[in-house]
Image (cartoon, rainbow, N blue to C red):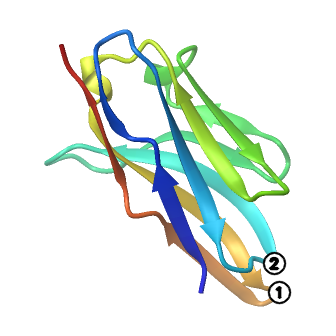
């Protein structure tokens, strides 16, 4: 069974940094894309950053220049380096993976979520 295991959330002061990690547990045939989303109470889940098998990387405008998504292919792990954090970055962050678990088995997988709180 494929699972995404997240770590790295926590509390930090404005201007601080955190790194989130997301490790794929279980066998995956081919990863198509991995991404980080975030959600605050009463709001829809928002795509923060994504990377795909072709190397394309995208960020939501509000985090450009501050967040960096990276992926270690051999380890099937994706990271989100977050610098210059702002109170408005406070949210539950979710890892997402779109992959073929087997040649004919497509899946859209989610991590359990990790809380990031930016406050003085």
Q: Residue at x 57, y 53 (%)?
A: 22
Q: Report how far apart the C-alphas of labels 1 and 2 lie in the structure.
A: 7 Å
Residue labelled with disc 1 = 103
Q: Residue at x 53, y 16 (%)?
A: 66
Seen in the picture, residue 10 relative to 102 is either above or below; the reply is above
Residue toward you, 53 or 25: 25
Seen in the picture, residue 58 relative to 65 is either above or below; the reply is below
Q: Residue at x 61, y 41 (%)?
A: 79
Residues under numbered marks 1 and 2 in contact, where contact means CB atoms less than 8 Å apart: yes
Considering the numbered disc 1 on the image, is that residue within a helix, a strand or a loop? loop
- Looking at marks 1 and 2 on the same chain, the residue that comes earlier in the sequence is marked by 2
Residue 18 location, x and y as percent?
46, 28
Q: Residue 29's mark?
A: 2
Residue 108 location, x and y as percent?
56, 72
- Determine crowd level at label 1: few under 14, some 14-19, many 20+ residues with C-alpha closer than 10 A: few
Seen in the picture, residue 90 relative to 94 is either above or below; the reply is above
- Determine crowd level at label 2: few under 14, some 14-19, many 20+ residues with C-alpha closer than 10 A: few
Q: Quadrant of residue 117?
A: top left
């Amino acid at each position: 069974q494929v699972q995404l295991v997240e770590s790295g959330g926590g509390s930090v002061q404005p201007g601080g940094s955190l790194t989130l990690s997301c490790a794929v547990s279980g066998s995956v045939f081919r990863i198509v894309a991995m991404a980080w989303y975030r959600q605050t109470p009463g709001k829809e889940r928002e795509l923060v950053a994504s990377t795909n098998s072709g190397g394309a990387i995208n960020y939501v405008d509000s985090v450009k220049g501050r967040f960096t998504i990276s992926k270690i292919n051999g380890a099937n792990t994706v990271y989100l380096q977050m610098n210059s954090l702002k109170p408005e970055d406070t949210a539950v962050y979710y890892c997402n993976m779109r992959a073929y678990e087997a040649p004919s088995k497509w899946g859209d997988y989610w991590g359990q979520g990790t809380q990031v709180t930016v406050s003085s």
